Image (cartoon, rainbow, N blue to C red):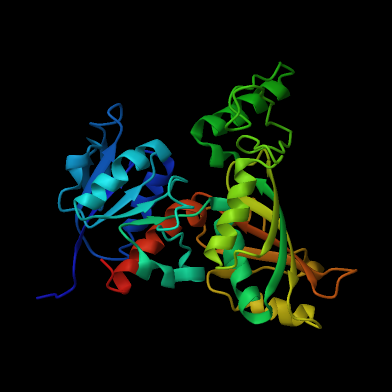
Amino acid sequence: MSNVKKYHVAIVGATGAVGQKILQYLEEKPFEIEQLTLLSSKRSAGKVVSFAGKDITVQEATAERFENVDIAFFSAGGSISEKLAPEAVKHGAIVIDNTSAYRMDEDVPLVVPEVNEGDLQDHKGIIANPNCSTIQMVVALKPIQEAFGLDRVIVSTYQAVSGAGLAAQEELTSQTKQFLNDEEMEANILPAGSDKKHYPIAFNALPQIDVFEDNGFTKEELKMINETKKIMHEPSLHVAATCVRLPVFHSHAESVFVEVGQKDVSVDAFKETISQGKGIVLEDDPSTQTYPTPLSAQEKKDVFVGRIRKDLDLDNGFHLWVVSDNLVKGAAWNTVQIAASLVKNKLV
């Protein structure tokens, strides 16, 4: 008779893109599941979803659905998390929230397992999954921080439209067809978070993701800045970000400049350090034009790094190119990793 503990798992937002990805990775059995409860909005309730060869009917998400649930994944929007996550905790569940609702709450761990798994020890029922663009960057930064120290990080992102949801992907498809047919492109969705002005995304680059704050930065940029400091336990770290949406369906790319604390670090030592980092695949060979791209990273769980080179003016400055699938490591896979870490460390 097996002594392996089995868990009752709930997924809020089970019919969405991230919810479906979570289901996909749970089928790989990162831990044993005894019961699976799938929850959604009233509109999507009643749909049937297949999991491990069984059909499961999706139910409307209400507080009562969390009775006897051990782990609850939330991926249905910040307002739903704010309303129902505390209710799930009251019923005894540990919530892993994929929205921005609790990320900067000082009582809520913001976790990327390769970077700060130990923060899970301090959870009070809710654990936050970071922003997708933050996740891949901090995975790449962690081995640099440990080996050489970090003084400054400047990042420019090249983000896929899937980060703005299914409607944004459909808009890119329709605009591409309109452009190729010499028709006027209809722009209704992007830039995400703006209800004042819209630009076509097809054959374009939009230097705005989410709304602008009074300091001129967008909310997306401030997420990267503030979340990086929290995850890496460096509140005084100098971080700046410019976030751009590109006409790419999946995977975010980032150009990252870092100033390390140690001097006289060679490019070879820097590359070797990166190659040994958890969850990182180094793809860096200019002689064969080897480097990661959004297409090559699609559907993969790792963070891919290439184009590593020393700055021409600063001895302690390095440039790197970081790519990862925003719906995989940037969302669903990191969420499942958090749950697996909780199980492994007997925190649930």
Does the image show residue 77?
A: no
The residue lying furthest to the right in this view is 313
Task: Give the vertical position of 264 relative to 335 (above or below).
Answer: below
Residue at x 65% of width, y 36% of height? 212
- Residue in the foreground of this view, choosing between 224 and 333: 224
Q: Which of 336 and 225 is in front in this view?
A: 225
Residue 37 x, y percent position in the rendering: 22, 46
Residue 148 rendering spot, x and y as whole percentages: 69, 79
Q: Can residue 32 be seen in this view?
A: yes
Instruction: Report which quarter residue 178 is drawn in.
Output: top right
> Which residue is at the front of the view, 71 or 287?
71
Q: Quadrant of the C terminus?
A: bottom left
Residue, x 72% and y 77% (percent of image)? 270
Q: Compared with residue 287, is residue 65 higher up or lower down, i.e. above or below?
A: above
At 53% from the left and 73% from the top, the residue drawn is 278
**Which quadrant holds the N terminus?**
bottom left
- Locate residue 117 relative to residue 30 in the image: left or right: right
Total number of numbered labels? 0
Task: State the image coordinates of residue 48 (x, y, percent, origin top left).
Answer: 25, 37
- Seen in the image, is 1 located left or right of residue 110? left
Is 248 left, or right, of 25 in this rendering?
right
98 displayed left or right of 209: left
User: Could you say which quadrant of the image residue 264 lies in?
Assistant: bottom right
- Percent across and percent down for residue 198 are 66, 24
Residue that sits furthest to the left in the current view:
1
